[in-house]
Image: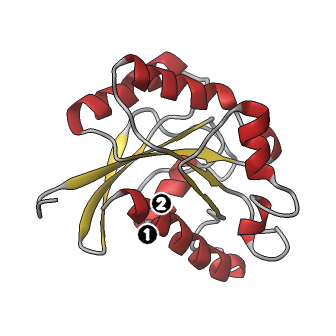
Amino acid sequence: MGKDKVYVVVVFGRTGMGISSLVNLIVGKEGAKCSREGRSCTKDTKAFRLDLDGRKIDVYDTPGFGGTDNKPSDNDIISKILRISKKHGIDLLINCLVPKDGIVPGHYNAVLSALRGQNREAPIAAVVTRLERVEGPMEGWWSEPSNNGGKMESKWNMVFAGHACVTTVPSDDIGWSQRRSESQKAVRALVLKFCH
């Protein structure tokens, strides 16, 4: 690709899953507005530039699905993602998920169907957050012995091109600084896999 190529990564998920916190983790600064209470803060899509390994990457923060209080409807969010796809193309979609009640196949399917309906394709990766308290490596949540990743595929037909298991605790939370550092490395490696 040329020097001026800008890769596009779009992060989406349900309201309260930590979409903006994940964007901040990827770009390495607290640019996207976040709520520590899990309330919706994001009303529109916004790109945050990341220069990583000589690549320019725009990481898009999006409003969460299922929001309330004058937040965009789910259809509006899908329209915003389609506009990004039409204008810039999308190199990677990241479905931001949390264990248990944060795995919502309807949002995954809605985004996938909308893109396919416009004859557009983009790989979808899963990033599972809020795993700072998992014993052992956070990656263990996805694989053995739980096989949560396999369950998503078999139970909900959510097939991902890649995944990362992370924490998005704020950078000022020094008790989890090692886990946050590991998380940033893992999610950036995932991004680079698709932005080459």
Q: Locate residue 51: give its quadrant.
A: bottom left
| Position of residue 168 measured from the top left corner of the image (x, y, whole percent) | 62, 62
Q: For residue 89, say whether it is visible.
A: yes
Above or below: residue 196 compared with residue 33:
below
Q: Residue at x 81, y 77 (%)?
A: 136
Q: Is residue 67 visible?
A: no
Image position of 196 with respect to 102: above or below:
below
Seen from the viewer's position, the closer of residues 12 and 32 is 12
Label 1 crowd (10 A; few <14 / some 14-19 / many >=20):
few
Q: Nearer the viewer, residue 100 or 19?
A: 100
Q: Which residue is drawn at the image coordinates 79% and 44% (left, top)? A: 151
Q: Which residue is mark 2?
A: 24
Is residue 133 shown left or right of residue 123? right
Q: Residue at x 33, y 41 (%)?
A: 90
Name the residue carrying label 1.
28
Crowding at dot 2, Cα within 10 Å, few <14 / some 14-19 / many 20+, comes out as: many
Label 2 sits on a secondary structure element that is helix
How far from the left and from the top, in percent, is residue 195?
33, 58
Q: Quadrant of residue 171?
A: bottom right
Q: Residue at x 66, y 64 (%)?
A: 167
Are the two marked residues, 1 and 2, in contact with CB atoms closer than 8 angstroms?
yes
**Label 1 element class:** loop
Q: Amino acid at mark 1?
A: Gly
Spatial CA span between label 1 and label 2: 6 Å
Q: Left or right: 181 with respect to 61?
A: right
As shown in the figure, which amino acid type bears the numbered disc 2?
Asn
Residue 125's tag is none
